[in-house]
Each structure stands twice: as C-alpha cells, then as structure tokens.
Image (cartoon, helix red, strand yellow):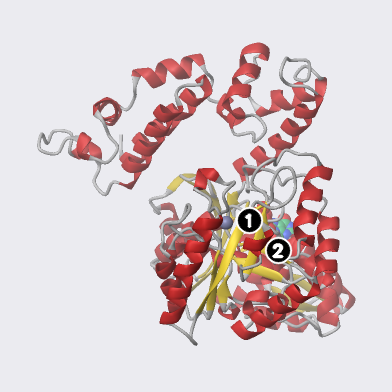
C-alpha cells in the first residue's frame, strides 16, 4: 500500500472505532497517525527494512501504531479493520456524519432498528419509528431529518477552499499539456459558490485528443467517467468530478459564458437574445437570417457576447439570475469589492487564547499586507476550552497592545478588542466597565446553540442593543457541512442592527462563511455595515479573507458597504458615533 492508502485505512479504522464508542484519545491517535503518514514525503513501505529508521521515529507513532502501519503497508490489509468491517457495514459511517446524530446515537439506531444508511434513516424518521425510541422523540427526529440534508450535501459537494486548492494544482498540471492554448475554470467554481458540485474546466486547443490524454494521466485521477470527442468527465481520488471541455480558441468567450452559468442566468440571457432575433449557445451569439441561415456575431470574449445582447459584462459572482439583469439595464451594476480594498482585519486570536501568533506577530503580518489596522479579539472567560480572558488578563493584554502601538505610532494601529461571549442566559460575559475600555467589541454565541428560536434571538438582540457592543461575529453559527445555523430570526437581527447602527460580520473562514451571500445582499439593501473578518488563529489565517470577499461579491457588496475598507480615522469616527448614540 502507498501512504495515501495506509492513511485512508487508518482513518477508516478511527471511524469504525468511533462508531463503537471507543476511547476518544485512541481515536485521535489513529487520526493523527493517518495525517502524519499522508504528509510523509517518503513512502513508508520503502523504509520498513531500514532498522536505523523505525516508524516509531515519526511524530506520534508508538509501537502499536507502527506495527499496524507496517502490516497495512506490507499486506494491504489489517485483521482488526477486516474484523470491524464485518461487524459494521461501512455505510453506517454516513450516519455518524449526520450533524444531529454523532456516533452514540447512530450506534443505537443501528443496533435497535438495523438502520445502516441515510435512505433508511430518513424513512424511519418519517414513519415515526425513530421517534418511538428511548432518547429520541419528535423534536430530535426533525433535527435528524435536517441533518441528513446537510450530510448528503457534504457528501456531494466540495467546499470552495478545498476546490480552490485542488483547482490550482490541476491548472498548473493542465497548462503543461501539449497544444493547450488557453485554460479557464467555469461553473459554480467561477461564480464563487460556497460549495461546488463539480469543477468545470475549459481548454482552448485545436487538438482535443492530446488535452484529454493529458488529463487522463493526472496522478489524482481515480476514474474516467466518460470520454467523447471534445468532452471528458473524470472523478478525482478526492471525490471531486472534473468536467473538461476542449473548445476552439475563437469560441472561448462564448463557451466560458455558457459554462459559467448559472443555468438560470443563461435562460434569461437566451430569452433576451431571442427578443432581439439572436441565438446564444456555447459557440457564440448568432443572428438568425432569412431562410434559416445564421451569422455569428460574437464568440471570442465574454464581453463581446454580452455586448451582442446589449448588456455590459456581468461579474460571474452575480450570475445567479437575482438582480443582475435589472442592475445592468439601469446601468447600476455594483462595482464589487476586491481583496485589495480591505485596510484591516477586525477579528483574530493570539497565543493568549487559542491562537498561535503573538500580538506583535499578528500585527507585523498585517502590516506586511499593507493594512492600516487590526483588532485583537481573543475569547472571553466563558470560553474556557480556549482559555478565554478574564478582566485582569484582558487588561494585561491591552497594556501589551499599548506598548506595541508605540512601535508603529502613526503608521499602524492595533485596536483593543474582545470577542465577548453572549451568555446562555443572555447578557455578556464581561462587566460593562471592562467593555467600556475596549475600542472594539465583537459579541458572539458559543454555548447554548440548541436553544429555541426565541431564546437565541433574544440573546443576540440583547447583544446588539448593548451600548458597548460594536457588532455581532458569525451571526448564525453555521459550520458548512457540519452544523446547521442556530434557529435565529435573522429578520429581527437585521432590524435591530439597523435600529442600533451596529455592524454584522461576514466571517471569511471557508468553514463558516457566516453571514452568507444572501444575507449580505439583504444587509446591503438595509444599509447595515458588514465587516469581513478572517477570525485568524495564526499569521497565515489571514489568507481566508479571499473567500469572504467572494461571498461579499456574490451579495453585491461594494467597497462602501464594508466597514474595514475605511481608513483608520474613518473607522474611529464610526466607532465614536456608535458610542455617542447610547
Ligand atoms: P454545480 O456543479 O452543481 O456546483 O453547479 P454548476 O453551475 O457548475 O453546474 P454544472 O456543472 O452542471 O454546469 C456548469 C454550467 O454549464 C451551468 O451553470 C450552466 C451550463 N450548463 C451545463 N449543462 C447545461 C445544460 O444542459 N443546459 C444548460 N442550459 N446549461 C448547461
Ligand atoms: Ca460545476
Ligand atoms: Ca459540470
Ligand atoms: Zn473568533
């Protein structure tokens, strides 16, 4: 077995043990070992006979694990894994990934009702047999049904950040293909959706065969699903499907427009073309002439295609058939925000809590990105797993910030912030006199996420109305593919934000993207300022801002809709105004 297969087997073992309810430290050890093996530059199978370099030299690999890895690498299987897979069908692992279920409850369902896949689970929830089990009930059934949807989606769609990294790898490989003239990604990936169903790749070339052969030899290809004259679909080993289309260079614009979609956007575009006596397809825009003849009037660039239909070029993030045609007609397509518009980041953690960078390291990294300011927002005391700050540690941190600020006086500023927990019973985790000294107070929910809509909404509204709170971080609490949003009344949240002049965060972590694009567009209409934050836990954590920017663009946000595009003095003025409202 190669490293990748060994690593996959160890992960599978961890999954099965988790389902059995094994000790969580043991499970974590297997998962860490899987990660270690996957990251090895050298194939483990090649060093097994070298007594000077036992596997136990690898970090986190003890004797027992080393033995298992050796067995796997040499023989391709492991008795323990085979035994377990006989007892537990692999399909039950899908159950464990249902957010409302987890390993314990999944095991009960398997034992009591013999449920071992999502289809049966859904049926059993609907028929009432799950609700009849001890420890379940109607309410938890409802949550499970919702969880099934999330799990199914997570199985089928890949998160944008993962797709982005994979696409970069694929792009540099495909650019080496002989005869590849020009290469572009299309589809939901180009539109920046938070997850993608598959990756659509266009290559301009006169020799489709060479391009398709080259893709077939990409080392990550798991399976070739289909191959035609100019079109090929493959499934990669990571599960992602890639649809390749080879097109003529002089039709690249038309193909790019067509395959970028969305389908709904294209339907509207074609309808408009028809009214003008035109036809649009992946080969171009055609004028229909008498006697069934047609003349191609646009195809080389996208702008040309849109212009032929009387439209300005529309940014891909807006092509969802929401407002873009209306805006285009009115000459009011928004000038969408870009990463370069940001002048600071207002949510990050340091070594004081669960981050890995010091204040100075975070600030230097921010400065080298050309920013003017950051806010340090470590957790407050209630978040004890992350060693949240009590008033005295927070004030110590602020003294340290004062010192750092002297270093770069006039050029760069660190705001004294806090990510203050909104307590389960309502109210904030730090006393008012402490919050009053902060420059910047983010409030967010970490505990009691299962509360009723009324309870959660009241807690968040209370925070928005609190005079010292600047705004709300990750307002819905969702984790993509893992955890649904809290049951929160977002209409009420938007209303309160307008009333109190508070901002809402677009948390750019690709696991969160919270607010999402649809929320951003509502916030924009209502004039609620958005802050795009990284929630960085290290100096490289700032990189995720690109994903926040994409979602903001999808929500139609411009520079002026986003608070952290302002200069430091404008930001200060905004915060002072907030303080004076109370
Ligand atoms: P996904 O992959 O589910 O995240 O979403 P998309 O939008 O990437 O969808 P996909 O991959 O099926 O197709 C890419 C684009 O190509 C789609 O947005 C519109 C266009 N397209 C593909 N197939 C058809 C089709 O049969 N009819 C029409 N009208 N458009 C199509
Ligand atoms: Ca696609
Ligand atoms: Ca596709
Ligand atoms: Zn945070």
Asked if the residue under mark 2 is in contact with the one under mark 1, i.e. CB atoms within 8 Å, the reply is: yes
Q: Secondary structure at mark 1?
A: strand
Q: Residue furthest left?
A: 52
Question: Residue 391 location in percent, x, y?
Answer: 56, 56
Taking 143 as reference, is 385 left or right?
left
Estimate the x, y position of residue 15 in percent, counting from the top left: 48, 29
Q: Which mark is residue 78?
A: none
User: Which of the 4 image quarters holds residue 105?
Assistant: top right
Location of residue 254 with respect to 537 vertically, above or below? below
Q: Residue at x 52, y 57 (%)?
A: 392
Above or below, 545 relative to 195:
below
Q: Position of residue 532 (x, y in %)?
A: 63, 68
Q: Marks 1/2: CA distance? A: 9 Å
Q: Is residue 245 visible?
A: no
- Foreground: 51 or 22? 22
Q: Is residue 102 left or right of residue 42?
A: right
Query: Which sits earlier in the primary sequence, circle 1 or circle 2?
Result: 1
Residue sitting at x 58%, y 66% = 417
**Quadrant of the image occupied by residue 581:** bottom right
The residue to which callout 1 is attached is 420
Location of the C terminus by quadrant is bottom right
Q: Which residue is mark 2?
A: 469
> Along the line of sight, which residue is nearer the eye, 123 or 245?
123
Question: Does 481 appear above or below 400?
Answer: above
Q: Would you say 322 lies left or right of 563 here? A: right
**Residue in the image at 81% along x and 83% along y:** 332
Residue that protrudes farthest toward the bottom in the picture = 410
Residue 538 visible in the displayed image: yes
- The residue carrying pointer 1 sits among few (fewer than 14), some (14 to 19) or many (20 or more) residues within 10 Å by Cα, namely many
Please provide percent x and percent y for residue 238: 48, 45
């Amino acid at each position: 077995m190669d490293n990748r297969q060994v690593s996959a087997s160890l992960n599978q073992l961890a999954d099965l043990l988790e389902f059995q309810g094994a000790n969580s430290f043991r499970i974590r050890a297997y998962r860490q070992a899987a990660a270690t093996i996957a990251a090895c530059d050298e194939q483990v199978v090649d060093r097994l006979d070298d007594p000077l370099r036992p596997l136990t030299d690898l970090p986190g690999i003890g004797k027992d694990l080393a033995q298992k890895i050796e067995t796997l690498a040499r023989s391709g299987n492991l008795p323990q894994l085979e035994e377990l897979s006989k007892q537990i069908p692999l399909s039950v692992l899908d159950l464990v990934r249902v957010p409302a279920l987890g390993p314990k409850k999944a095991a009960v369902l398997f034992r009591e009702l013999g449920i071992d896949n999502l289809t049966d689970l859904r049926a059993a929830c609907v028929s009432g047999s799950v609700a009849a089990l001890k420890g379940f009930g109607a309410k938890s059934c409802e949550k499970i049904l919702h969880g099934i949807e999330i799990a199914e989606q997570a199985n089928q769609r890949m998160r944008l950040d993962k797709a982005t990294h994979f696409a970069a790898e694929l792009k540099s490989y495909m650019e080496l293909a002989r005869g590849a003239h020009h290469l572009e990604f299309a589809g939901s990936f180009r539109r920046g959706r938070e997850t993608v169903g598959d990756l659509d790749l266009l290559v301009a070339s006169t020799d489709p065969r060479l391009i398709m052969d080259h893709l077939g030899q990409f080392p990550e290809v798991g399976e070739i699903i289909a191959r035609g004259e100019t079109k090929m679909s493959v499934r990669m080993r990571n599960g992602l499907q890639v649809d390749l289309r080879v097109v003529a260079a002089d039709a690249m614009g038309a193909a790019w427009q067509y395959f970028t979609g969305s389908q709904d956007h294209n339907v509207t575009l074609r309808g408009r073309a028809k009214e003008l006596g035109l036809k649009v397809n992946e080969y171009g825009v055609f004028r229909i002439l008498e006697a069934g003849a047609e003349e191609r009037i646009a195809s080389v660039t996208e702008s040309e295609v849109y212009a032929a239909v009387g439209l300005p070029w529309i940014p891909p993030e807006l092509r969802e058939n929401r407002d873009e045609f209306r805006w285009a007609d009115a000459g009011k397509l928004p000038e969408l925000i870009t990463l370069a518009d940001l002048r600071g980041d207002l949510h990050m953690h340091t070594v004081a809590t669960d981050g890995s960078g010091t204040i100075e390291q975070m600030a230097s990294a921010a400065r080298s990105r050309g920013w003017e300011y950051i806010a340090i927002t470590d957790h407050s005391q209630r978040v004890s797993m992350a060693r949240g700050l009590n008033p005295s540690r927070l004030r110590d941190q602020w003294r340290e910030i004062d010192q750092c600020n002297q270093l770069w006086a006039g050029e760069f500023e660190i705001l004294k912030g806090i990510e203050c927990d909104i307590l389960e019973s309502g109210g904030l985790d730090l006393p008012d006199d402490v919050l009053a000294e902060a420059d910047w107070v983010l409030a967010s929910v970490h505990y009691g996420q299962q509360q009723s809509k009324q309870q959660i909404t009241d807690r968040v509204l209370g925070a928005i109305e609190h005079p010292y709170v600047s705004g709300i971080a990750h307002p819905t609490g969702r984790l993509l593919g893992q955890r649904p949003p809290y049951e929160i009344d977002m209409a009420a949240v938007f209303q309160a934000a307008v009333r109190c002049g508070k901002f809402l965060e677009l948390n750019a972590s690709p696991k969160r993207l919270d607010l999402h694009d649809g929320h951003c567009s509502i916030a924009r209409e209502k004039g609620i300022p958005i802050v795009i934050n990284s929630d960085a836990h290290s100096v490289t954590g700032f990189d995720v801002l690109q994903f926040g920017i994409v979602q903001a663009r999808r929500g139609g946000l411009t520079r002026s809709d986003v608070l952290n595009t302002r200069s430091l003095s404008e930001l200060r003025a905004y915060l002072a105004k907030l303080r004076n409202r109370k």
